[in-house]
């Protein structure tokens, strides 16, 4: 999203000039615009550049790839990987597939929601965590499972949520 200085604020907390970000995106679009199935890789790369996919980025992609905005927005809406809202530094995904649900996945989710003070689809005020629900991580024998970024935590107990989240908080030393 544009701020008052004409920069885009990304999820990493830094401002990058609008022009530089769109210039990088245009390089990617040149590479993919005529490739079959190129839209999804472009969206993935754009989300990496901007931290999320604001409407102006989606409109730019649609125009450059000669696709209707509704098609681009539809793909973004269909796949849960894509986000049109800024996301936290750490993405927590709670599995609610059958095995995880039966073994307490819902209680784990409720514990995380209480601990962070957010609901599914939301991001903490300090942008440290975003919370999502997933259907299966392939760890059914070790259910319930959660993922934080690329780390899978198995046999999670609601009482251990604070301990599991602790290493992902920004330390005072890192910020100084």
Image: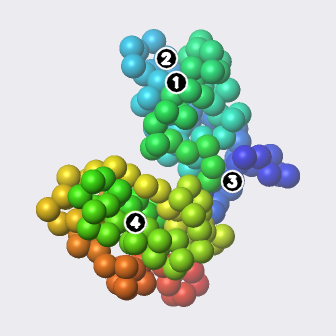
| Mark 3 lies on residue | 9
Q: Badge 1, how many Cα within 10 Å: few under 14, some, many 20+?
A: many
Q: Which mark is residue 33?
A: 2
Q: Earlier in the sequence, mark 4 or mark 1?
A: 1
| Mark 4 lies on residue | 106
Q: Earlier in the sequence, mark 1 or mark 3?
A: 3
Q: Is residue 9 left or right of residue 169?
A: right
Q: Looking at the image, is mark 4 or mark 1 nearer the viewer?
A: 4
In this picture, is 100 found above or below 77? Answer: below
Disc 1 is placed on an element classified as helix
Q: Nearer the viewer, residue 5 or 55?
A: 55
Disc 4 versus disc 3: distance between alpha carbons? 34 Å
| Mark 1 lies on residue | 29
Q: Residue at x 64, y 60 (%)?
A: 14
Disc 4 versus disc 1: distance between alpha carbons? 41 Å
Q: Nearer the viewer, residue 78 or 45?
A: 78
Asked if the residues shown at circle 1 and circle 2 are in contact, with their CB atoms under 8 angstroms apart, the answer is: yes
Identify the colour scheme used.
rainbow
Q: Earlier in the sequence, mark 2 or mark 4?
A: 2
Q: Residue at x 22, y 65 (%)?
A: 143
> Residue 159, percent across and down?
37, 85
Q: Is residue 89 visible?
A: no
> Residue 108, percent across and down?
39, 72
Q: Is residue 51 left or right of residue 93?
A: right
Q: Residue at x 59, y 68 (%)?
A: 118
Q: Within the image, what quadrant is residue 34 found in?
A: top left
């Amino acid at each position: 999203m544009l701020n008052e200085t004409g920069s885009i604020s990304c999820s990493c907390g830094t401002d990058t000039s609008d022009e530089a970000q769109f210039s990088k995106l245009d390089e990617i679009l040149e590479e993919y615009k005529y490739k079959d199935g190129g839209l999804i890789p472009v969206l993935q790369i754009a989300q990496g550049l901007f931290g999320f996919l604001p409407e102006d980025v989606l409109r730019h992609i649609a125009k450059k790839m000669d696709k209707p905005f509704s098609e681009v927005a539809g793909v973004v809406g269909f796949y849960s990987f894509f986000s049109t809202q800024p996301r936290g530094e750490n993405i927590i995904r709670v599995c609610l597939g059958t095995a995880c649900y039966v073994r307490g996945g819902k209680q784990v989710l409720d514990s995380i929601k209480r601990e962070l003070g957010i609901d599914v689809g939301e991001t903490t005020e300090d942008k440290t965590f975003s919370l999502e629900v997933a259907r299966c991580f392939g760890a059914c024998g070790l259910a319930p499972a959660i993922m934080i970024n690329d780390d899978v935590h198995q046999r999670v107990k609601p009482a251990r949520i604070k301990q599991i989240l602790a290493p992902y908080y920004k330390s005072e030393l890192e910020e100084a």
